[in-house]
Image (tube, grey):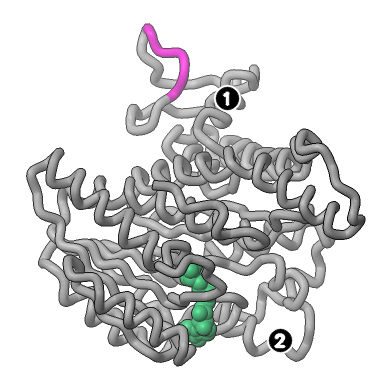
Amino acid sequence: MKPELSNYRGREQTYFKHLFLGNYLIQCGIKVGSRADSFTYIEGFSGPWRNESQKLEDTSFSIALSRLREARDTVKKTFGRDLRLRAYFIEKDPEAYRRLNAYASEQRDIEIKTKRSTFEESISEAVAFAQGGATSNFTFTFVDPTSWRGFALRRVSPLLSLKWSECLINLQTGFIKRFITIRESHQSFLELFDSSEPMEVVLGLAEDDREEYIIREYARRVHLAGRFDYDSAAVVPRPDKERIQFHLIYLTRSRKGVSAFKDAEKSMVEEMPGIRGRAKQRRRVEQSGQQEFQAMAETPSLYLDRIAARCRGAAWKQIQQEIEKSQRLPYDRAFDIAMTYPLVWEQHLKEWILENSSIVIDGLGPKERVPKIGKGHALRLK
Ligand SMILES: C[S@@+](CC[C@H](N)C(=O)[O-])C[C@H]1O[C@@H](n2cnc3c(N)ncnc32)[C@H](O)[C@@H]1O
């Protein structure tokens, strides 16, 4: 079930995040459930926060648990397996924690532990909780802060490094871009990246290139710190302005996980034009006091198209460079590179390859026209 949009008036970016989280977790739960005996969900900045629903249905923890329950039911029906669900929720604010804990204590079918503390101070306990799952346990960690503070890379690394695990991080790119060059924020960014290099590099970049550098550099560093195999990112713009709010950075050890992440991104992006159009219309009406016809909310926004074009352009450039460098680039590797960029899907990669007359695909069978993952196909220049 999708989150109820009417609970997110004026904060539709949270609707996108919750929609994405739910869509991803159900797919992930089903895939993982075919092999794992337990699924441990850890959330570092749990809330509730600015929720509208009395029953807390518009909170990430409630959405995560309900989608994981659905996954558990499907796993039972499809594979005849019992997937044990477990969750560990961390929240710093006393009042929010009280509500979170009350909610958690009502959930009888899931083993839940809550902690009133900061995320960073809870890392060793979170690791121990994850390790207390079944021998075959999968851990998914969601880090959902309101700023770039409170999840210093070095401090959270033990959680990222858990053997069979994935991580989703809400990176507040909009704020980061604004504050990363400010001297007073230096220490907090040093902790975020575990290096001062990004702050120096950003200073030498044009305004337009900073965002992309920040997300790629952050993903690269988390990838290394957690010894992940793949990373990707999805973009969430402000609902009523042509500006980025945050990116969801995803780290995994599974290529199938990347495909599931991309499916969830696609479902989220499909909803963006309509929801953003209505949010922007509401803002115009509030500011001008003038009513508008409903149809005016459908005015197309080229903003997302522009971001997509930038991401795709950058992805193709990187793949082209890799082909030139290595002479022969496995298609699987081209896929991995392309999927690190927001708004790039495999269909775009295939179209780009087929439309690019200077690229030859090696290893295609007699009836094959497009390259596929896991088939040993490779790309080279004519
Ligand atoms: C963006 S809100 C979380 C929203 C929630 N995940 C959701 O989507 O429904 C961030 C939450 O983190 C809490 N918080 C702030 N700093 C924290 C920290 N260092 N450790 C843990 N929680 C923190 C805030 O009180 C707030 O409830």
Which residue is at 32% across, 81% downward?
102
Residue extending furthest toward the left: 80
Residue 353 has which mark?
1
> What x and y, as percent, mark residue 244?
71, 58
Q: Nearer the viewer, residue 360 or 16?
A: 16
Q: Secondary structure at mark 1?
A: helix
| Residue 317 visible in the displayed image | no
Q: Is residue 258 above or below residue 309?
A: below
Residue 300, percent from left and from top: 77, 36
- The residue that disc 2 covers is 185
Q: Label 2: few (<14), some or many (≥20) within 10 Å?
A: few
Q: Which residues are magenta?
A: 367-371
Q: Residue furthest top?
A: 366
What's the residue at 62%, 57% (across, down)? 12
Q: Residue at x 34, y 43 (%)?
A: 256
Q: Is residue 277 above or below residue 132?
A: above
Tell me the distance, in whole angstroms, between the alpha carbons under discs 2 and 1. Answer: 43 Å
- 2 and 1 marks in contact (CB < 8 Å): no
- Residue 368 on the magenta segment: yes
Magenta span: helix, strand or loop, mainly?
A: loop
What amino acid does circle 1 point to?
Ile
Q: Quadrant of residue 218?
A: bottom right
Give coordinates of residue 260: x percent, y percent.
39, 44
Identify which amino acid the numbered label 2 is placed on: Ser
